[in-house]
Amino acid sequence: MGVSFDTTSATIVVPIMAASLEDVALQWEAAVGAGADIVEWRIDALEPQLWDAETVGESGAALRAQFGTPVLATMRTAKEGGGFTGSAAQYRSILRDAGGWADLVDVEVGYRGAEELIAELRGRTAVVGSFHDFTTEPSAATTVQLLGQMQDLGCGVGKVAWMVTTEADLALVKNLQVWAAEHLSMPTVVIGMGPLGTESRLGNSALISAFTFARGSVESAPGQPTVEEIRASVS
């Protein structure tokens, strides 16, 4: 398993946001059919009783083998806009196990024990170090600091997402995309969330990012365009 990134075409991630394992399989098939380059399984969208490493791992491994499309395993916490409200032990257990079947595993760099978890995972899979802020205006200093930290921790990809509410916010996010592409050896994703942030996911922004997100059956964050819209923007 593995994922390579380049700047000659957009690498599109389609998230799966399903509460049941049956719906996960249906959305996974739909994402592949829509042309996803990577399927992101948002495990935090599952019913809480399914937040179990063995349950998730069996389904993830089977669907990865069935469809063949690379998969990003993500457990987004409530603090960063997701649905996971379980224990730190659950978080680490599920993502640690995902290192055995997922091509990429998302780890929130601000989460308790993140550094140790990243160190455990990075020899087995590509780690996407991530940070999401839905309330604070984008910060250049914070973005640079976070991406530097992710690179120092050995992450395969660094991802920072801000809510965009003004044209100035959008311009800053797009400038940070260029800065990261020019100054870091680690592939990066700098995203503007919200309707105004959609432009940060299209065109040249999609090309210089490690990957960009398109909405699937359900969007996982505000402002996600369709696969077709992203393809058209880079053609």
Image (tube, rainbow, N blue to C red):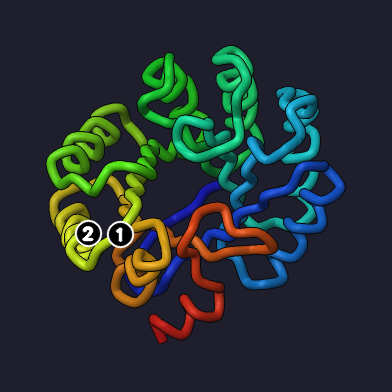
Confirm or deny contact between disc 1 and disc 2 (CB under 8 A): yes
Residue nearest the observer in this picture, 167 or 54 = 167
Q: Quadrant of the C terminus?
A: bottom left
Relative placement, left or right, of 143 versus 110 is left
* Quadrant housing residue 90: top right
Relative placement, left or right, of 161 versus 31 is left
Name the residue beneath numbered marker 1: 165
Up/down of 144 relative to 173, above or below: above
User: Which x, y percent locates residue 175?
Assistant: 16, 61
Tell me the residue at 53%/36% (across/down).
Answer: 76
User: Which x, y percent locates residue 85?
Assistant: 60, 24
Residue 214's tag is none
Q: Secondary structure at mark 1?
A: loop
Q: Amino acid at mark 2?
A: Asp
Q: Amino acid at mark 1?
A: Thr
Name the residue beneath numbered marker 2: 169
* Measured Cα–Cα span from mark 1 to mark 2: 6 Å
Give neighbour class at mark 1: few <14, some 14-19, many 20+ (Cα, 10 Å).
some
Up/down of 223 relative to 115, above or below: below
Tell me the residue at 17%/41% (across/down).
Answer: 144
Relative placement, left or right, of 213 versus 168 is right
Tell me the residue at 43%/16% (across/down).
Answer: 112
Residue most extreme to the right: 22
User: Which x, y percent locates residue 183?
Assistant: 13, 51
Tell me the residue at 36%/35% (across/down).
Answer: 155
Residue nearest the observer in this picture, 75 or 163 = 163
Q: Depth-wise, is mark 1 or mark 2 nearer the camera?
A: 1
Give neighbour class at mark 2: few <14, some 14-19, many 20+ (Cα, 10 Å).
some
Up/down of 141 relative to 56, above or below: below
User: Which x, y percent locates residue 193?
Assistant: 39, 56
Q: Secondary structure at mark 2?
A: helix
Residue nearest the observer in this picture, 154 or 189 = 189
